[in-house]
Every structure is written in structure tokens, then in C-alpha cells.
Image: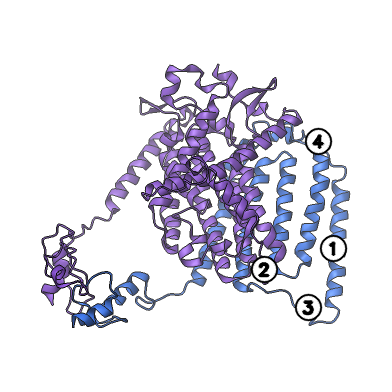
Amino acid sequence: MTSIAAAGAMSSGEAVTFWILAVFALFGALGMVLSRNAIHSALWLVLTMLCLGVFYVLQSAPFIGLAQIIVYTGAIMMLFLFVLMLVGRDASDSLIETLRGQRLAAVALGIGFAALVGTGLYRALRETPAAGLDQANAGGNVQGIAALLFTKYVFAFEVTSALLITAALGAMVLAHIERRRGEKRTQPEMMRARFAPGNYPARSPDLACTPRPTRSPPLAACRMAR
Amino acid sequence: MFVAQDPTLQDFGHDPWWLILIKVVAVFAFGMLCTVLGVWFERRVVARMAVRPGLNQAGPLGLLQTLADGLKGAFKEDIMPRTADKVVFFFAPTVAVICAMTSLSVIPFGPMVSIFGHHTPLQVTDVPVAVLLILACSGMAVYGIVLGGWASGSTYPLLGGLRSSAQMISYEVSMGLSVVAVFMLAGTMSTSQIVASQASGRDFHILGATISAPGWYAILLAPSFIIFFIAIVGETNRAPFDLPEAESELVAGYMTEYSSLKFLLFMLSEYVAMVAMSAATATLFLGGWRAPAPITTFWAGANSGWWPLLWFFIKVVLLVFVFVWLRATLPRLRYDQFMRLGWRVLLPINLVWILSLAALKVSQDPETGDGKYVILGGFLVGIVLLALLWPSGKRAPDKSLEDQIKSRPAGSFPIPPMDLQVPPSPRARRAVAEREPANVGAGSGGDLVDKES
């Protein structure tokens, strides 16, 4: 796999891809924050997540990269649905400031925080050499991750999955509305009710009982039969 | 000989740029050609199944009809609805096409061949996680449909898009789980290695007895194969799961507002996705480009050179035929039936199947030792529990048709005569009217409705 860089050294192809996609990722992130329409925000987020997935693949983690794309595809689709269901199709942010100067303060604080975190990370990680990637990927990337998941971190993952299942169950219990039997009719019940004796919207059954030619409309045939 | 033919992961990534370009263009052309021929194939086959001639006007056997339709479509007026979200409306069909085409890039079309002196595998590229790339592409392709539905700015497309998203989320789970069984047996996620692992049959040692099983995962992992195929029909929005474009409910679903080239792009993406998914099924379950068993026994060269391209194409066409067959045969599912099938049938069966497969694999491992008796005991307990808890209530046999009609209460909905007697038309002349009525059916029950009333 020459497309995936060896550990430590950064090939020129990797560098070029990084600098192109980094711009896209940043634009996606900015667009997500700045766009007024919630659906557009979700779409910008898709762009950023796709770029992140490619970054993982570039850094010799193809499994994580594709898992990122698959998982976030589904996740952002959910976000999309939530926006549609909770906010509506044409909803966009209102521009009315409820607190005076709040927006300016938020922008200043946000940029300041991002600058602090960015410089902190940069200074901390600048001199860190990449280590252990070759050993980690020795038996193949997928096999390496599988070995770790099912030995060292198996308990952590089981606990996480139990937590997620509990959350899903809780959401279902909270959102579930208990309906008594017969309160809301199911499709088969409605069908039976529609064809129950005495429930004919179009014509009375005693008129329609005579055998009639299929080509003529039913009402006319009945009248003639009488 | 077979060793030299089988590409390994190390064989990828050494092509010069012009060879990569040739491969990419060839795969793109394959996708386009398959769309043109696929539409023709579908319309011919559906017509034959409906006992009518089908396409037969443009070109020999109507082969040029799709080209003519495509040209006509391209010159139609491109309508942009006033309420549409213009950028998203424009990009949605391209997203669908790009995702469908991308998944073709990891499909192995054949073994190592020589192209202009270069020894290279007949596949654009392969990565250790190639099957995940196919899954990711099919997941992303739904964005084209959902966004197209949302950006159209009207109700039916929006409903179609929402249905499509629900469909994707429910059926991708079954699809991913059935691929897991393949990963477990093949021990790899790269498509070329999965094809290589289906090359020969394998021997299973179950309690001392040796059973030699065939190499194809379609036979070895039959439940996974069936579930995977059902899931890809749902994933590509084909009938009977074409709820997003249900023409009897939603006009044309997500593509109601689309016209001209954008509409053609959606059609293109549907057919390319169908072909790509058929190719993925052939790769994962039907031995990929390898010739089927009887051919290799008397022709050793069937799996070398360019011949595998033919076997692969035959397999893909057969799978596309199944897609078309399903469309011609089955009525569209109702939305709740569709969801019930996905979550309550496919998913539990898949989970139980994977669990038992994993248990089988572990019990075969010589390192397991006495643990395999525990697994065997677990199987036995599971079977006993299933037998005990199986719903046993026998249904009473259905009453005969006459009894059912007689037991209806007075004033029930009128039903037509059971012997399909055609009564004389009241407008007919007397001579015709006094003739004996023609008996169409062979029923002898008489006119039950008349007797009743």
C-alpha cells in the first residue's frame, strides 16, 4: 500500500492531500457555524466529516477512516431528520438579539478559546515524534484494532454498549404513548369496518345484489334491473 | 498457476499514471454502458414477463431506444422550482451518481493480466477495508435522494426523501451484519482477497467427521447471502422496496420536480447502483470473477487471462435479472410491512446466524479444547428452548368458499357470482338475450348471491 504513508515520514502526496482537504474541512466547519439554515449546517458538517475520514485513511488508519464515514453518514442523516421534524423545512435562525452585545461577546470568546486550544495543542505536539505505528499495523490495520477491541478494551466497549442500549430504551419508554386496545384502529380493522354490513358509502346493497354486466356502471345497472 | 493469477494487496498501487487513467475510464465506461444496456434489458424482460413485445422500434431489438431517450431527455427544458433550494437541488443528483460510481472502483473484475507489458490486477484499486468502502458509498448515495427530496421544496419529494432515509438506516444494518459473516470466514475485508478465499472448497471438522463444503459463500453462508440480497434491493430503492418513488402514492417521489439532465442523473445513479451492488454480491458471495465449478474441471485456463471478465459479467447480468424479476413479480410493500421486515425479521435472523457461525468457528479452533463442548451444550439448550417455546397452536382449517359466503350476515357487501357467469346485456337484442348465458369459468356452485337473497 504505497498510498498510505509510512510511519513518521510524510510523503509529498500525503502533504498535498492534507493541505487541499484541510481547506475544505475548515470551510465546512465555518460554514456549519455560520449558515443560517439548519439543514445547510448539517450539510457543511458532512463535508468536514468526509475530510476527517480521508485524513484518518492518510494516516494509516483506513478502518477508522471508513468507519467514520459510515457512522457519521447515518448520524448526520439522523440530525437531518431531527431538524426537519423539530424545526420544519424552511426554518432559519432569527437575527433578533435578545441580549445586547451577546453576539459580539460570543464571537470574541469563541475565537479566543479556539486560539488558546490551537496554540496549546500546537506547542504541546510540535516536537512529538510518531511512534509505534508500524508495530500497531504489523498484522494489518483491521486485525490490530480487532485484537485491541476484543482483549484489552473489551470491558470498556461492553460497558459503553450497555450504556447506549439503556439510553435507547429510556428514550423509547419516554416517547412511548400507551394506547388502549381499540383506541386507534389498525389498517386491517379499518378495512373490516369498511366492508362490514350496512356500511356502504356509495349505494345501498339491495340495489347492487343483482348480477350485472361488468361493463356498465353499477348504479345504472341496478336501476335497469329494477 | 493459480498462485500467479491471484492478486495480493501488495500488487496494488504500483501502476503508472496512464494505467490508472485507463482503468478508471474503463470502469466509468462500464458503469455508463451498463446503464444504457440495463434500461433496455429491464424493459425487455419486464415486457416479456408481461407477455408483450417491449422495445422493438429503435435499432435491432430496440437496443438504441435508451440512447434515443437519453438524447431526448438531455434536450428537454431544465425546470428549477421557485421554492427549490438552488444549490442543493443542483448537487443532489451528482452526489447520487458519484457515490454509485465510486463503489465500482474496488470491484475486482479479473485476475492479474498484462496491459501494454504491465502485469496488473484487473481492478482499479484495493484497500484492506474495500468492502467498507462499498458500504460507505451506498450509505452516502442516500444523501443524493434525501437532499433532492428536501431541496425540491414540495411535499411529495420531501416524503420520498424521508422514506429513503428511513430505508437506508434500517437496511444498512442488515446489510452490514450479513457482510460480517463473510469477513469471519474470509478473514479479510479486501475484495480481491475475499474472491481468492472462495477459490477452493474447504473442509470442516465437526465432531470428528470431515465435511467438505463448496467455496462459494452463497452456499456456505446462505442466510447471509439471502439477507444481503434483500438488503441491497432495499438499499438501491428497487421494487418491491421502491417506496421513495412510489408512483401510486407520491407521483415520482424524490424526483418529482426534476427534469432534463438532472432527472437523467438520478436514473443513471439508480442503474449504476444496481449494477455495482450486483457486482459486490457476485464478489462477496458468488466467487467473484472465478469460473463456476464445472467449467474449471475440464478447462484449466478458465481462470486466467481475460476470460474471468466474461464469468464476472455473466454473474452480474444474472443478478441484475433477479432485480428485474423481482420488480416484474412483486407488488410494492406498505411502509409498515417494509419496516417490520427489516427490523423484526432480517435483523434477528442475522444476529442469531452470526452468533451460531462464530460459535461454530470457535469450536473448530484446536486451541479451544474442551470449550467446544460448552458451545455444543449451548446449541443443544438453544434448540430445546426453541422447540419448547415454539408457538404450537394449530389453526383451524379454513372453511370452504361456500360456507364462508353462507356464514356472512344479512346485508353484507355484495359479491359477484362465483361461477363467473356473464349475464346477457340489457342493451342486447332479444335473440341474443334469450340465448343460454356463456359459462366462462367451470364453477358448479351456481349463483350463490342470488340464492342467498
Please tell me the numbered disc located at residue A95. 3
- Marks 4 and 1, how far apart at CA: 30 Å
Circle 4 sits on which residue?
A8
Q: Chain A in the picture: what colour?
A: blue
Both labels 3 and 1 in a single chain:
yes
As helix, strand or loop, the secondary structure at mark 4 comes to: loop
Asked if disc 3 and disc 1 are in contact, CB closer than 8 Å, the reply is no
Contact between labelled residues 4 and 3, with CB atoms less than 8 Å apart? no
Q: Colour of chain B?
A: purple
Residue at left offset 31%, top offset 81%: A202
Amino acid carrying label 1: it is: Phe
* Closer to viewer: mark 2 or mark 1: 2
Q: Are tags 4 and 1 found on a single chain?
A: yes
> Picture coordinates of residue A185 (x, y %)?
37, 75
In the picture, residue B437 is in which quadrant?
A: bottom left
Q: Amino acid at mark 3?
A: Leu
Count of numbered circles in the view: 4
CA distance for labels 4 and 2: 48 Å
Residue identified by numbered label 1: A113
User: Mark 2 = which residue?
Assistant: B84
Residue at 38%, 49% in the rendered image: B52
| Horizontal side, residue B105 vs residue B177: left or right | right
Callouts 4 and 2 close, C-beta under 8 Å: no
**Residue at the image position 52 percent from the left and 29 percent from the top:** B310
